Amino acid sequence: MRSFSDVQSDARLAMLNVTPLGSLYVKLNEMGLPLAVIRHFNKDAPPLLIEAYVDLLQEMRQWIERKPGLCHWVKIEEPLEIGTDYVVLPFHVYTTSTRSYVQQENPPEVPEELDKMRNAFRRVIGRSKDAKEIVIEGILARSLLKPNGKTYLAADGGPFIVVEPQLKPEDVRQWAALDKPSAIS
């Protein structure tokens, strides 16, 4: 399994920003065009949380797929590559996210699909007693019900693509603790 230092030496990277879940880089092709986003776990989310982070993304995707009324409306992206201290995520080009609809100046017209997606989500949340599902529902609520710069409607009218869920380091730590109660503190 490769480490971020291997990726750094192999690829053209440009720093995007530093987040509580590590540093974000964009991987560029030889012409300087973006190919992928790399999340380097190096800040408040140490590399030992990568397994929980990836598992949480996969479980969110599967949770959505098990909801017939929702899976038509929402798609969660999964990592393209997982290293010892990084993950590679697909790079998306879009100009309008769900946050765009509430901008102060000249917001785009809100598509009717937004209410349909949000209503479908509201119909399936809040019933679970399972701790893992409660974590998933909370993250998805931030990603789907609130204005979000990383959720957008696909050009063909659906689904809404969640480029990366609105995860916080404490979400990933909580998920890790639910999987291995003694492993993460």
Image (tube, rainbow, N blue to C red):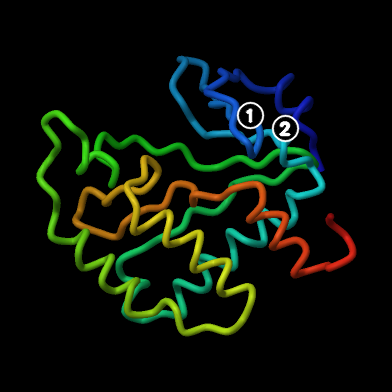
Cα gap from disc 2 to disc 1, whole angstroms: 7 Å
Q: Secondary structure at mark 2?
A: loop
Q: Residue pushed farthest right? A: 182
In this view, 38 is above or below 72 = above
Residue type at tag 1 = Ser
Identify the residue shown where x is 57% and y is 74%: 133
Circle 1 — which element?
strand
Q: Nearer the viewer, residue 35 or 44?
A: 44
- Dot 2 amino acid type: Lys
Mark 2 closeness class: few <14, some 14–19, many ≥20 residues within 10 Å: some
- Choose the circle earlier in sequence order: 2 or 1: 1
Q: Quadrant of residue 52?
A: bottom right
**Residue 126 occupies which quadrant of the picture?**
bottom left
Which residue is depicted at the point 55% across and 24% down? 17
Nearer to me, 154 or 149: 149
Residue at position x 29%, y 74% in the image:
120
Identify the image quadrant of the N terminus.
top right
Which residue is drawn at the image coordinates 27% and 66% (left, top)?
117
Q: Is residue 29 above or below residue 68?
A: above
Left or right position of 50 against 21: right
| Residue indicated by mark 1 | 23
Left or right of 100 in this view: 52: right
Q: Are the residues at dot 2 and dot 1 in contact (C-beta closer than 8 Å)? A: yes
Q: Position of residue 23 (x, y in %)?
A: 63, 29
Asked if residue 126 lies left or right of residue 103, the reply is right
Task: Name the residue that disc number 2 marks.
Answer: 43
Which picture quadrant has residue 84? top right
